[in-house]
């Protein structure tokens, strides 16, 4: 295997599937099955989920930013619980941890406890982002990847990898197989926000970007196939 311990970043939109908003439970179950295949290989898996299928904090200009971000965190918890339930339906050991304490529905995030779950073969889903406003779930992904000492941060997107310009707008867009963190930042490619990219660069955590809508790719990446784009030093 190319990677032993991964941090997988899933956006809220991925969980919404073709519905666009809310949760598409059939899509969530499909994702859970693909992730379980990787777990069955012996990979240790942490997952950060976004909440954009319910709420986007930055886009709300009528509300205090911190309050808006906290509402967004609640959206990530709904997604984390839904994904966790899908794993339970597949008889897959899973734990949901949140950056804001919610005793009745999830564990509070503790780094050593999360690592222990991973070592025992449990999938750990991280909700609430970093637990603080003004930080995206991209930044939370980079932070959790660093804390659990993940071999890679794998980001699921709707495109095949990182392009020099938007492939949905420009037919001449070129995809990179590999690219440096500093080039991503300098070219403002918006793979992840600059804070997340900078943290991965500082901690030397590779970022692997792939198209989540193509079935079976996650497993192939873990087994070493050169698919998508890898961002490294």
Image (tube, helix red, strand yellow):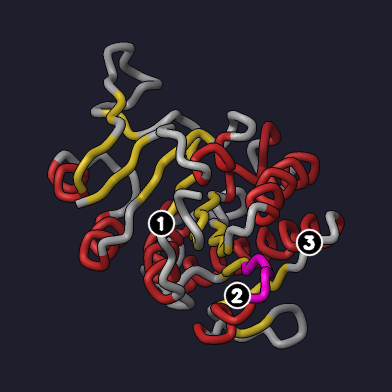
**SS label for mark 1:** strand
| Disc 1 from disc 3: Cα separation | 22 Å
The crowd level at tag 2 (other Cα within 10 Å; few <14, some 14-19, many 20+) is some
The stretch of residues the image draws in magenta is 118-124
Q: Nearer the viewer, residue 47 or 65?
A: 47
Counting from the top left corner in percent of width and height, residue 80 is at: 66, 63
Counting from the top left corner in percent of width and height, residue 35 is at: 66, 49
Residue assigned mark 1? 152
Residue 121 lies in the magenta stretch: yes
The crowd level at tag 1 (other Cα within 10 Å; few <14, some 14-19, many 20+) is many
| Residue furthest to the front | 1
Vertical arrangement, residue 165 with respect to residue 206, above or below = above
Vertical arrangement, residue 121 with respect to residue 110, above or below = above
Marks 2 and 3, the one that precedes in the sequence = 3
At horizontal 34% and vertical 50% (from top left) the residue drawn is: 192
Which is closer to the viewer, label 2 or label 1?
Answer: 2
| Disc 2 from disc 1: Cα separation | 16 Å
Which is closer to the viewer, label 2 or label 3?
Answer: 2
**SS label for mark 3:** loop
> Are circles 2 and 3 on residues that touch, CB within 8 Å?
no
Vertical arrangement, residue 117 with respect to residue 62, above or below = below
**SS label for mark 2:** helix
Residue assigned mark 2? 119
Counting from the top left corner in percent of width and height, residue 85 is at: 80, 61
Instruction: Give the image quarter of residue 136.
Output: bottom left
| Residue furthest to the top | 171
Residue assigned mark 3? 92
At horizontal 54% and vertical 49% (from top left) the residue drawn is: 11
């Amino acid at each position: 295997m190319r990677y032993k311990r991964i941090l997988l970043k899933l956006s809220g939109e991925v969980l919404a599937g073709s519905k666009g908003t809310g949760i598409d439970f059939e899509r969530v179950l499909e994702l859970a099955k693909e992730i379980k295949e990787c777990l069955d290989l012996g990979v240790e898996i942490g997952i950060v989920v976004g909440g954009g299928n319910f709420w986007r904090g930055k886009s709300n200009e009528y509300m205090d930013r911190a309050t808006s971000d906290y509402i967004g965190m609640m959206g990530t918890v709904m997604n984390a619980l839904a994904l966790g339930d899908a794993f339970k339906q597949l008889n897959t050991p899973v734990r949901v941890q949140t950056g804001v304490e919610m005793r009745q529905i999830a564990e509070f995030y503790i780094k050593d406890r999360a690592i222990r779950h991973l070592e025992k073969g449990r999938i750990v889903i991280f909700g609430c982002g970093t637990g603080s406003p003004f930080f995206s779930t991209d930044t939370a992904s980079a932070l959790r990847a660093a804390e659990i000492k993940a071999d890679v941060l794998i980001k699921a997107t709707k495109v095949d990898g990182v392009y020099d310009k938007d492939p949905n707008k420009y037919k001449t867009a070129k995809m990179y197989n590999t690219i440096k963190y500093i080039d991503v930042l300098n070219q403002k490619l918006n793979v992840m926000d600059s804070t997340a990219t900078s943290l991965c660069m500082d901690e030397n955590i590779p970022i692997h970007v792939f198209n989540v809508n193509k079935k079976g790719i996650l497993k192939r990446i873990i087994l070493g196939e050169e698919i998508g784009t890898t961002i490294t030093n």
